[in-house]
Image: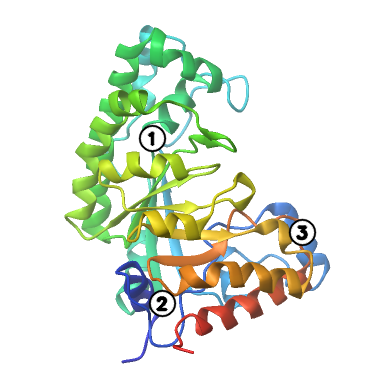
Amino acid sequence: MTETAHSRFHKVMSGALPGDRLPIIEWAGWWDQTIRRWESEGLPAGLDTQEIRNYFSQDRHFQFWIGSMCPGPTPKRAGHGAPYIENEQDYTEILPFLYPATLPTDPQAIRQAALAQTDGSALVWITLEGFFWWPRVLLGIEPHLYAFYDQPELMHRINQHLADYLLRLIEQFSALCVPDFATFAEDMSYNHGPMISKELFDEFMAPYYRQVIPALTSRGIIPLIDSDGDIEPLIPWFEAVGLEGILPLERMAGVDVNRIRAHHPRWKMIGAFDKTVMHLGEARMRAEFERLLPVMRSGNFIPSVDHQTPPGVSLEQYRLYMQLLKEYTEHACRED
């Protein structure tokens, strides 16, 4: 059987290995500054994300980030991380702008992605706003953390509304295309661990994950978490509510995929390649792939940059990274 982008992904995520190589993906797009640098060094100008993937001979994948605000004019806030709301009354007033009744994504784009998924040439995934992320968007970064204690009823109200909305989204999207996997945007860790306690997770997040995740797994959609920072302490929390894996596994935060694999044999992972070595030459990049190779051979792991490729990486250096990525994804599937 000839392997495809689709078949490779699902073999790896079932714990097996493809016959030829692991998937070759950059799970996140590229910084604008990175693209501008590469265009000055020979990348054809004006390529979109899919065209850049094709340029580097990466496997195709279509990500649909589906937000929780209605299309069109939205409420204003002072800046990134600032609040939209401060209290229950504000939330009630903003509700007409939230949780659109119909899918806020171009149906034709979804259908086109579904065609590529059906012929095996591409993966399809959706990103949904999670139960830590979305209240933080509404309340602002610092007030959100106080709200766990000061406004618990509002926190539960927001997350129940979000859960109801996500269930509707999953049904509407799956009517057009059943995604291969879904990520919940959370970003709930810094370099020293989680931003909240397990007790807060169990009270304010777990009940809502338990409502939504069955709607994914019953359709064969793999549920993953997207969180930066040191996520290792959170893995048992996520496993307990039915989540099956995580990305991007930031090395700078001390994340060790070999240690994760030892303690969580079937945990699914994407990422983990230390972006901070990409500009340091072949020897350092090879050493990083050697670090990842045992986990690459274990299944349930796809190597990729552990966040977006920084603009300090030249086009030539990225081409070398891609050359080594292809070499090691093949090496991982051989028995030598």
- Callout 1 secondary element: loop
Look at label 1 and name its amino acid: Ser
Disc 3 residue type (three-letter): Arg
In the depicted structure, whether residue 113 falls above or below residue 208: below
Q: What's the amino acid at mark 2?
A: Ala
**Residue at the spot x=71%, y=56% of the render?**
276
The number of discs equals 3
Circle 2 SS class: helix
Q: Residue at x 30, y 12 (%)?
A: 153
- Position of residue 45 relative to residue 159, above or below, is below
Cα distance, mark 1 to mark 3? 31 Å
Determine the secondary structure under disc 3: helix
| 1 or 2: tag closer to the N-terminus | 2
From the image, tell me which residue sits under label 2. Answer: 5
Q: Nearer the viewer, mark 1 or mark 2?
A: 2
Residue 314 picture location, percent across and down = 79, 66
- Marker disc for residue 54: none
In percent of the image, x 78 and y 64: which residue is there? 279
Depth check, front residue: 300 or 73 = 300
Q: Earlier in the sequence, mark 1 or mark 3?
A: 3
What is the number of the mark on residue 36? 3
Q: Nearer the viewer, mark 2 or mark 3?
A: 2
Q: CA distance from mark 1 to mark 2?
A: 30 Å
Q: Which residue is mark 1?
A: 68
Relative to 82, does residue 69 appear above or below in the rendering? below
> Pointer 2: residues within 10 angstroms few (<14), some, or many (20+)?
many
Is 108 left or right of 333, judged from the image as shown?
Answer: left
Few, some or many C-alpha atoms within 10 Å of disc 1 (few <14, some 14-19, many ≥20)? some
Position of the N terminus by quadrant: bottom left
The percent position of residue 179, horizontal first and vertical second, equals 31, 60
- Horizontal and vertical percent position of residue 277: 72, 61
Q: Which residue is located at x 58 percent, y 63 percent?
A: 49
